[in-house]
């Protein structure tokens, strides 16, 4: 039954371990059917199973099971401007993005799955300059609303705070002594929780994701409001 997620198969993480040792086209093409069976299929089931759960949190965050153009990130790396020419990503990524967004640079919930590196949560990664300006302006102009986000009990219990790469100095137009200048300096805003491979192998992983995404909702709501998007 589609969407009947019972956990990731054992071969999921084994596949990525072997890919990291054989990151070339010949090996991947020889293991492409295995990739579809051990990675793509199970993640499509997870995405389908998350649809009704996400709808309870926000009707504007979409779970799209399509292997291309949906919530599942493609395994192919963009090597055009990188010195690292490995053709394939050595992890799987799922991004439940806002209905108004077409790429990863919009508010959404994210799941990262790699051998020894499992994490998930919500936020926005490297928004474009216009969106970033709106987010910084919202923090600067509504410090009390931002304070409610970072001091939210559920968010604080689930995460170690708001993260994201930052500028070395305050961005132009913002006061250096603003109480939240360290957050204003950020170029991304997200809250992520570390998980375990063991949990991903059971249907209980769905409950963990739903609970974690719900805990990140104060941040998601603030981001969406700042960008004039419904949450």
Image (tube, rainbow, N blue to C red):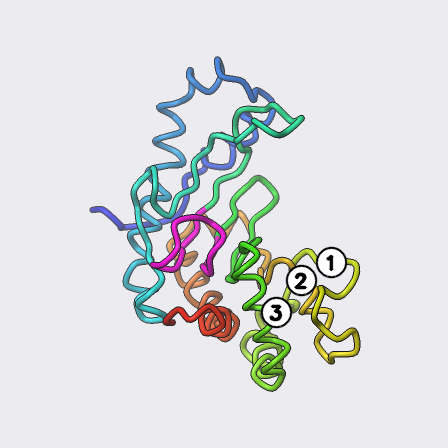
Query: Where on the picture, by quarter, is residue 84?
Result: top right
Which residue shows up at 42% across the image and 71% down it? 228
Q: Which mark is residue 186?
A: 2
Q: Position of residue 206 (x, y in %)?
A: 39, 58
What is the quadrant of the C terminus in the image? bottom left
Q: Mark 3 to mark 2: distance in Å?
A: 8 Å
Q: Categorize mark 2 by other alpha carbons within 10 Å: few (<14), some (14-19), many (20+).
A: many
Q: Which residue is mark 3?
A: 136
Q: Position of residue 65 (x, y in %)?
A: 30, 46
Q: Is residue 108 magenta?
A: yes
Q: Mark 1 to mark 3: distance in Å?
A: 12 Å
Q: Categorize mark 1 by other alpha carbons within 10 Å: few (<14), some (14-19), many (20+).
A: few
Q: Position of residue 148 (x, y in %)?
A: 58, 83
Q: Secondary structure at mark 2?
A: loop
Q: Categorize mark 3 by other alpha carbons within 10 Å: few (<14), some (14-19), many (20+).
A: many
State if disc 1 and disc 2 touch (CB < 8 Å). yes
The magenta region covers 94-110
Which residue shows up at 46% across the image and 68% down it? 227
Which residue shows up at 40% across the image and 36% down it? 39
Q: Secondary structure at mark 1?
A: loop
Q: Nearer the viewer, mark 3 or mark 2?
A: 3
218 or 51: which is nearer to us? 218
Q: Mark 2 to mark 1: distance in Å?
A: 6 Å
Q: Position of residue 8 (x, y in %)?
A: 41, 44
Q: Is residue 172 above or below residue 94?
A: below
Q: Earlier in the sequence, mark 3 or mark 2?
A: 3
Q: Which residue is mark 1?
A: 167
Q: Is residue 108 above or below residue 27?
A: below
Q: Secondary structure at mark 3?
A: helix
């Amino acid at each position: 039954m589609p969407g009947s997620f019972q956990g990731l198969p054992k071969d999921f993480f084994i596949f990525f371990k072997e890919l990291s040792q054989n990151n070339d086209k010949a090996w991947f093409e020889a293991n492409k059917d295995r990739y579809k069976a051990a990675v793509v299929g199970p993640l499509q089931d997870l995405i389908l199973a998350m649809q009704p759960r996400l709808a309870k949190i926000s009707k504007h965050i979409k779970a799209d099971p399509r292997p291309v153009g949906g919530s599942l990130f493609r395994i192919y790396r963009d090597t055009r401007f990188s010195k690292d020419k490995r053709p394939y990503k050595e992890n799987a990524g799922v991004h439940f993005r806002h209905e108004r967004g077409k790429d990863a640079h919009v508010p959404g919930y994210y799941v990262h799955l790699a051998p020894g590196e499992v994490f998930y949560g919500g936020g926005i990664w490297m928004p474009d300059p216009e969106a970033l300006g709106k987010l910084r302006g919202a923090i600067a102009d509504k410090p009390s609303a931002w304070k409610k986000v970072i001091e939210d009990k559920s968010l604080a219990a689930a995460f170690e705070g708001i993260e994201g790469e930052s500028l070395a100095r305050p961005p132009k137009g913002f006061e250096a002594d603003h109480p939240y200048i360290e957050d204003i300096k950020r170029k991304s805003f997200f809250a992520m929780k570390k998980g375990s491979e063991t949990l991903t192998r059971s249907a209980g992983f769905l409950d963990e994701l739903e609970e974690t995404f719900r805990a990140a909702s104060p941040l998601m709501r603030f981001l969406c409001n700042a960008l004039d998007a419904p949450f």
